[in-house]
Amino acid sequence: MAARASNRPRVRVAAIIVMDDAILLVRQRRTAAPYYLLPGGGVEGGETLEDALVREVSEETGLLCRPLHPIFINDTISPDGRRHLVNITFVVEVTGGTLLTDSLDASIEGIELVPVARLGDIDLRPALAEYIQSAYRDGFDTAASYLGAIWTPESGPVQ
């Protein structure tokens, strides 16, 4: 889900789902080139971070999950300051459901398992590839880290 222009930050939760040495990502296309996101989305008023994450993962991927712990927190602030997202990324455990071939979310073009080693080769937003790879090597056993502001311009890496 793209952040709407606002003078207030929006909160987005995202899930790291590991399957067979790959990370589950959703593919979106708002310009000519696709880009990838961790499954997740906006937190609604009155909704806990965990409830939002479970809802968003189910809507986007068909999987049921249980959040284990937050691992990354970062801001995504557009250069003009009109869009500001606070991203909270959780490590999750899949507890059920069936992985969809097509997402129920119309903004998602596809669902892909991307090998951990290939994360740096794609346009992942926010640009967390190196952080995910490092946490993967450590077994996702680290406490949450604040990564600062990470912004990816629309002309991100080309595949």
Image (cartoon, rainbow, N blue to C red):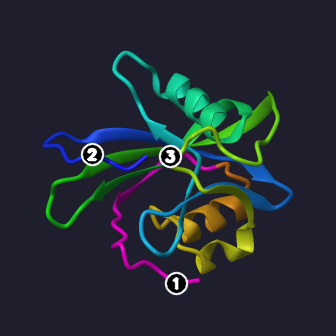
- What percent of the width, then of the height, locates residue 142? 60, 50
Residue in the picture at 52% in, 84% down: 158
Residue 144 located within the stretch drawn in magenta: yes
The reply to whether dot 2 and dot 1 touch (C-beta < 8 Å) is no
Given residues 98 and 107, the one toward you in this image is 107
> On the picture, is 52 further left or further right than 148?
right
Magenta extent? 142-159
- What percent of the width, then of the height, locates residue 36? 56, 62
Tell me which amino acid carries mark 3.
Answer: Ala
- What percent of the width, then of the height, locates residue 133? 65, 67
Residue 138 visible, this orientation: no
Given residues 146 and 7, the one toward you in this image is 7
Tell me which amino acid carries mark 2.
Answer: Arg
Which mark is on residue 158?
A: 1
Q: Is residue 77 above or below residue 32?
A: above
How many residues crowd mark 2 within 10 Å: few (<14), some (14–19), many (20+)? few
How many residues crowd mark 1 within 10 Å: few (<14), some (14–19), many (20+)? few
Tell me which amino acid carries mark 1.
Answer: Val
Q: Is residue 73 above or below residue 151?
A: above
> On the picture, is 145 further left or further right than 53?
left
Residue 11 visible, this orientation: yes
Which mark is on residue 4?
A: 2
Q: Residue furthest right?
A: 20
Q: Is residue 91 above or below residue 26?
A: above
Read off the residue under disc 3. Answer: 144
Q: Main secondary structure of the magenta part?
A: loop
Residue in the picture at 25% in, 50% down: 84
Position of the C terminus by quadrant: bottom right
